[in-house]
Structures are given as structure tokens and as C-alpha cells.
Image (spheres, rainbow, N blue to C red):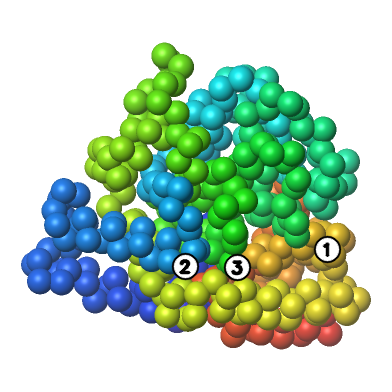
Amino acid sequence: MQRVFNFAAGPAALPESVLQSAAAEMLNYGQTGMSVMEMSHRSSDFERIIEEAEADLRQLTNMPDDYEVLFLQGGGSLQFAMIPINLMKNGKADYIHTGSWTKKAIEEARRYGDVKVLASSEDGNFSYIPDCSDLPVREDADYVYICENNTIFGTKYCELPYTKGKPLVADLSSCMLSEPLDISRYGLIFAGAQKNLGPAGVTLVIIRKDLISDELPVFAPTMLSYKTHAKAGSLYNTPPCYNIYMLGKVLRWIGELGGLEAMKVRNLEKARLLYDFLDGSSLFKGTVRKRDRSLMNVTFVTGNADMDKKFSAYAEARGLVNLKGHRSVGGMRASIYNAMPIEGVKALVSCLEDFERENG
Ligand SMILES: *Cc1c(COP(=O)(O)O)cnc(C)c1O
């Protein structure tokens, strides 16, 4: 069986060289005589793995020293709770609503405090990003929350919101390290690894040190305090060791390809190929306002659910898999994260062209 081009939204394709390198080290990592899966998280070998991953991340992102890097568990979804539990000092937070993932984040935050929705694109089925240049941010809001790339709806902020001095908290689960970013503009960034960073099971959190609270509400478990993990260098308890090792390999792969500038060039080229096709197509069309289009998740439809289904099956027969759109949007979604090679996107465009010729 040949490997396919996997357009899944997450867990998603990993760089082939990363998988090969992990396979080569599976039974014997370095000179240890054991797999990384069998290794103590307190061993010097594992310490080197986690320290190198953090150092590579800091270097790739040019991270300022006043930020802490945490490797946590619980996925992006646990951050929906950890963020309000740790960051709500006044019990108030302001959210921008751009789709399913902010809906969940808002609902979760409402369990812990007073949440105001500053702007929403729900009126357009989340096909655009609302204007965030002059938001009614509350004087005493503890933070402003966004989902920077909306995995399901295929939108992305082309400009960060103006938060009037409040810390910006951002869910970068599906766009982290797809292009250069200015960490100093954020108070907290988080990303589940399974989209762009590695296998599912580790969640990356980057937090400005002054936002790490000493005191949490009494109900909050020790494990849900950022302080617990910051103090212990993400080794308070057993971390997801193998996932951190894989994430480290992905970071090294990004570095070898030229870092985040190179990722951006590569991702722009891939996205342009696909969007240019969609803009010229008589059968398929993109679902998102042009300026807000994601580089990572490209959503499109024919306008006919049966035709959409027929296309997904047609593509699958050519080894282009997981193109079915999320159930809440329908149509198709091609997730073209860092690891998707340009050959995969070219194969998809050819497939779209052929299908259009045969069915247009
Ligand atoms: C996938 C995803 C999540 C949820 O991640 P889990 O790790 O499954 O909890 C949250 N936000 C965004 C933007 C995502 O794409």
C-alpha cells in the first residue's frame, strides 16, 4: 500500500522524514538500548529531548525571554478551561466568536466568570472574520480571546485585533508555526499538536510570565495551574514523552527547511494554487471571504451535496483522502498544513480539474 495524500484536519499528515527518523529510532534511541516510549521522563536522555524541543521552538519563533513554554495534556479543549481559571482575576473576559472552537471556549469560560462576546461572524455562518479594529473591550476585562485560524470554517485573521492594552489570548491549534509570528503581541498562545506540530497528545502553551498566577480559586486542581507546570519545567508529572519527542523532530524539520519564513513561502504557494483554481472554477467555489481565507484549511463546495459526495469519493480513489468538509459546513475541506507537500496540492488541483471536466 502506497502512502496517500492525507488532507485531514487533525490528526493530520506528518512530514515523511520525521516518521522515518522515528521509525529508525523506535527500538533503540541513541545509545540507550530502548525506545523513547520506554524511557524515564527523569532520565538525562529525555531531559535532553524536552530541552532541545523548547530551545528549537524559542529559536524558530524568536521568543522573548519573558515567555514560558509548557508542554501539557488535555488538548486544546482543556485550555478552554485552564485559561479562564488561571487568567480571570477580575472574573471578566472578552471573546471574539468566529466558529465552533470559540463557541466551545466561550461556553467553558462562562462556567468561571462573566464573558462578553465583543464581535461575531455567526450571521454569515462564520465565513468571515469580524472587524476588530475598534472593539468594545471592557475596562476591567482580564483578556481578549480569539481563535486565530478557524479549522472548521477555513477563516483566519489577517490582522490581530486591537485589544486596547488587554492581553491577547489566542488559539493557534491549526496555524501554529505555519508562518512567522510576533510572540510579544500575545499574552498566551496555545496549540494542540495534532494539526501542525506532531501527534495528538501534547498541547503547547506559550505564556507571558507575568500572567502566571500564584493563587488560583480553591476548586482548581493543581494540575490545571500554569504555575505548577512552569515551576517544574513541564515535568510536574509524567508528560506525554513520546509526543514531545515527535514534536521536537517536527521543529527540527521546520528549521532544516529554513524556519518560519520558508514555511510561509511554501504555505502561500500551496494555498495560492488551490484558491486560484477555485476562483477560476465553474463548478467549485470557496466558502470564505477572500481576505479572511486560511492558508491551512481550504473550504469549498459545489453547492450540491450529492456532487460534493461524489467528488470526495472520486478523489479518494486517486489517493487523496479526508477531503470531506466538517459536518457543520458540508462540502469539502482540504487541510494543507506544513507537512503537506506541494505535490499533494498539485495532485488535488489536477483531480479537481478532471472532475470538473467530467461533471461540469
Ligand atoms: C482541533 C482544535 C481544537 C481542539 O483540540 P483538541 O486537542 O481536540 O482538544 C481547538 N481549537 C482549534 C482551532 C482546533 O483546530
State the count of labels: 3
- The CA span between labels 1 and 2 is 27 Å
Q: Where is residue 297 in the image (x, y as percent from the top left)?
A: 67, 62
**N-terminal of the two: label 1 or label 2?**
2
Give the mark toward the camera: 3 or 2: 2
Task: Select label 1 or label 2 by which is in front.
Answer: 2
**Residue underneath mark 2:** 60
Report if residue 305 is visible in the image. Answer: yes
Q: In which quarter of the image is residue 344?
A: bottom right
Secondary structure found at label 3:
loop
Label 1, residues with CA under 10 Å away: few <14, some 14-19, many ≥20: few
Q: Residues within 10 Å of mark 2 (few under 14, many from 20)?
A: many
Three-letter code, disc 3: Glu
N-terminal of the pair, mark 3 or mark 2, is: 2
- Tell me the residue at 67%/20% (across/down): 114
Give the CA distance from mark 3 to mark 1.
Answer: 17 Å
Label of residue 179 in the image: 3
Left or right: 43 in relation to 85: left
- Placement of 207 over or under 247, stated as above or below: above
Q: Between marks 3 and 2, how big is the CA–CA gap?
A: 10 Å
The residue most toward the right is 282
Q: Looking at the picture, does residue 306 appear above or below residue 145?
A: below
With 130 as the anchor, is 209 left or right in this view? left
Under mark 2, the amino acid is Leu
Residue on which disc 1 sits? 291
Q: Which residue lies furthest to the top in this view?
A: 218
Q: In which quadrant of the rendered image does the C terminus lie?
A: bottom right
Q: Residue at x 15, y 72 (%)?
A: 30
